[in-house]
Structure formats: C-alpha cells, structure tokens
Image (cartoon, rainbow, N blue to C red):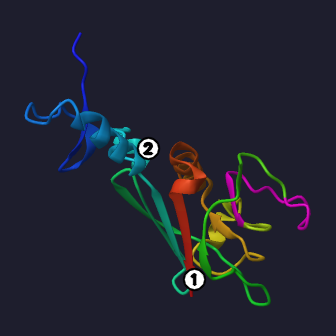
Amino acid sequence: MSKQRMTIAPDGLCPHPLPARISDAMRPVLAAIALALGMTGAPAALAASVNVTIDLSDQRMYVSAAGRTYTWATSTARRGYRTPVGTYRPIRLERTWYSRKYNMSPMPYSIFFLGGYAIHGTTEIGNLGRPASHGCVRLHPDNARILFDLVRRFGKSATRIVVRP
C-alpha cells in the first residue's frame, strides 16, 4: 500500500503525491508548513461557507453556499421596531422555537445571530416582501429550512450574516 502525500492543488486542497524530486528530508518540513497553514487536504465541503445578505430596503435575502445561490423574500422590522444592521455569525440554531416575548409565536428553523434576533420561518407568508416583524428576519418556512440545513451542514463558524440598510 503506497502512502499518498498532500500538496496544494491549483483548484483547492486535495491529495496529490509529492513530486519525486522533493527529497525525503523535505517532506516533513512541507507537511508541517501545510498543517500550519490549514492545508491538510480536507474535503472542499469543510472549507465551504454560507454567505447570507439581508437587504432591508428591498426585503430580500441573498444566500450563496455549496455553489448555489438563492434569493428569497423576507419580512424584517415594521415601523416602531428595528432589525439590527451589521455583520454577524450564528449564535445558536433551534429547529423548533417559540417566542417567549411575543405570545409564544412559532419560530421554526431559527438561526439566532444577535441576542433574541433570529432568521426563522413564519406562518405569515402573505407579509413576506414587506416589513412586518418585531425585528427578526422572517422567511417562508421552506426557505428557512433550506438555510437552517445549510448552516448546520457547513457550521456556524463558516456562516456569515450581513444585514444592510
């Protein structure tokens, strides 16, 4: 059984045998450098990310992950409330959640990103595309599930949420 050595491929990180001209003395040095730089030949899926952009002005969410892009209608804060603008990472995921603050309203597929603010599914799908929430970002439940599954698959640390005015 021959051992495969790791090198950097032009299109990312994947296992390739090191060229024969690299001396055996250099192999541990190159391996240490690759390890220090995080170049361990991990599958591309582990290096992937989920990028979420919520545009408050047009009440849309743009998601890119796993080579796909999605655009969905949202409902964010209505008059008298606010959806916080900024860049965030998910804090926690809750498949099933109920708002303690707002009459135990269902918040399926919740992705909390700042305190009690979350991206989640809604039963009020007729309001999508216009401000209607107390500050959370509401999605159609089918879309909330897709996003929830992407974040769970790639991880909270590989997910970036940008809320722009």
Q: Which quarter shows the C terminus? A: bottom right
Which corner quadrant of the image does residue 70 belong to? bottom left
- Residue at screen point 39% across, 43% down: 35
Instruction: Answer with left or right where residue 140 lies relative to residue 83.
Output: left
User: Farthest residue toward the front?
Assistant: 25
* Label 2: which secondary element: helix
Label 2 sits on residue: 46
Three-letter amino acid code at the position of disc 1: Leu
Q: CA distance from mark 1 to mark 2?
A: 30 Å
Residue 94 visible here: yes
Q: Nearer the viewer, residue 104 or 10?
A: 10
Residue 72's spot in the image, x, y percent? 49, 66
Q: Which residue is mark 1?
A: 56
User: To which quarter of the image does residue 85 belong?
Assistant: bottom right
Q: Residue at x 73, y 84 (%)?
A: 82
- Residue range (magenta): 99-113
Camera-nearest label, 1 or 2: 2
